[in-house]
Amino acid sequence: MAKVESNFKNMMATLLGITLVASAALGLVYQSTKEPIALAQQAKINNAIKAVLPEFDNQPGNEAYSVAVDGGELTFYPATREGQPVGTAVKTFSNNGFAGLIELMVGFLPDGTINKVTVISHKETPGLGDKIEPQKSEFCVQFEGKSPENFKLLVKKDGGDVDAITASTITSRAYCDALDRAYNELKKGGKQ
């Protein structure tokens, strides 16, 4: 039996072969999961739009437009029923959450009143900051039917009208920041 000498060329060839096989496998997994992940994300957005707006009969996703603001992007989804505007859903954000980025979907009626708000994503502390989620507390209910024109989107501690979540003032402020950003851009754009 011939003795194989370990040398630099053999080690590099082996390492190259392993790397090629691993990267090909990773590429195949990525390609096979890319479309289902995109479909799941789109379904999540569509469900959020339905949750925050009154009944509509158009496809808001087909009429969506985005605006770059504060280093991020807001996406507007205008909704109509029988050709008449029923509101606009806005995918908004705040980078000021206790754990960073918070993404919300807020539904505005044609007069600028907040219809409903739901959470798309966050990494807030379980049991504290995650109370921004509608299924975990009534925090979001206080915004329903309120017009940001006369309802200050600041926590009471900062001179606003919002009751903060106990022990989660930073999260509450970020939530208000996201809503305020969406409302201000909606007013600027004039599209509803």
Image: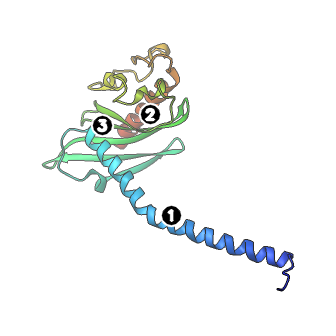
Which image quadrant for residue 62? bottom left
**Lower sequence index among marks 3 and 2:** 3
Q: Residue under label 3, please give it.
A: 107
The mark closer to the camera, 1 or 2, is 1
Q: Is residue 156 above or below residue 102?
A: above
Q: Is residue 48 above or below residue 13?
A: above
Distance, label 1 to label 2, CA atoms, is 32 Å
What residue is drawn where x is 51% and y is 69%? Answer: 28
Q: Callout 2, which amino acid?
A: Ala
Distance, label 3 to label 2, CA atoms, is 13 Å
Where is residue 37? Give x, y as percent: 42, 56
- Report whether residue 61 is seen: yes
Q: Which residue ends up furthest to the bottom in the rendered image?
A: 2
Q: Residue under label 1, please give it.
A: 30
Q: Name the foreground residue: 16 vs 92.
A: 16
Q: Residue under label 2, please give it.
A: 178
Where is residue 5? Give x, y as percent: 87, 79
Where is residue 161? Give x, y as percent: 39, 17
Q: Callout 3, which amino acid?
A: Gly
**Lower sequence index among marks 3 and 1:** 1
